[in-house]
Amino acid sequence: MAYGKVEICGVDTTKLPVLSQARMLELFPLVHAGDKAARDEFVQGNLRLVLSVIQRFSSRGENADDLFQVGCIGLMKAIDNFDTSQNVRFSTYAVPMIIGEIRRYLRDNNAIRVSRSMRDTAYKALQARDRLQSRLNREPTMAEIAAEMEIPQEDVIFALEAIQDPVSLFEPVYNDGGDALYIMDQVRDESAKDDNWVEDIAIRDAMRRLNDREKRIMQLRFFEGRTQMEVAGEIGISQAQVSRLEKQALLHMRRSMQVN
């Protein structure tokens, strides 16, 4: 796959312009008002963003031109849906949308087939999540997404997990400016049921120093081997919150064990 080539889809990538944050803010009112010239300038000024995203898929063996075109679709969707009143940089908002568009393309062209009904449920769940996120100004829980769709929570979880691509365990899937959430954080660890964990006095003593919510998360994650998505659904918080609380609890336990 020629990701290092200079020209993609007839575009000389070495000559792509870069828009400043100030210029983007100037252009947005014009873009949303239907000014084609402003929209073209905005798209052109963010093509490097698309280019940087498709580098993540360099090991897939996919055609760079195809992925670039799909990524541009994601970019344009981001432009259409971006809310300038939110205190978020456009690139922070656009990158997940570009990645999502590329992953949908790869899923639809994947040899591992997922049933049409399962895919439809997953896509509706993603749309419901976006609506709720806009309405609530936070990431919705699985229970809230299920309630919005009026279907069982288990159906939402199964559908979203079914459309996940095989990727590296160390690929970051979410970052809110703090610690990144990695694929490995979502993986059930069957070895976590080892009796040695329960019998280790130092760990049990460190666990006692955690608050109730942290204890519950640690119990589900490391003693019952649940994924972060499953824990989020059971406790009623977002997966990002589970990740943050889990890291915080592990840090507290580590410090406690070091003191002891």
Image (tube, rainbow, N blue to C red):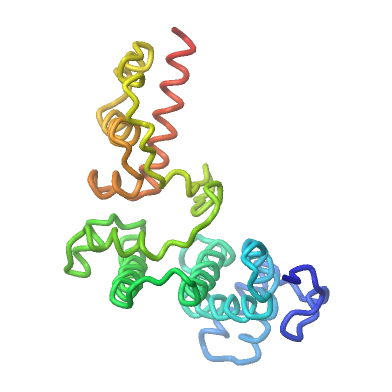
The residue at the point 50 percent across, 79 percent down is 77
Name the side, left or right, on which 187 lies relative to 84.
left
**Residue 205 location, x and y as percent?**
33, 13
Vertical side of 13 occupied by 39: above or below = below
Q: Nearer the viewer, residue 175 or 134?
A: 175
Q: Residue furthest top?
A: 260
Picture quarter with the C terminus: top left
Q: Is residue 227 above or below residue 68?
A: above
Rendering coords of residue 95 (x, y %): 56, 65
The residue lying toward the viewer, choosing from 61 and 45, is: 61
Q: Where the N terminus falls, by quadrant?
A: bottom right
Instruction: Using the image, determine if residue 195 lies above or below residue 77.
Output: above
Residue positioned 35% across, 62% down in the render: 160
The quarter of the picture where residue 9 lies is bottom right
Answer left or right for 76 relative to 83: right
At a point 17% along the width and 62% down the height, the residue shown is 152
166 left or right of 213 in image: right
Give percent across and percent down for residue 178. Answer: 52, 43
Find residue 4 and report its image quarter: bottom right
At 24% from the left and 43% from the top, the residue drawn is 235
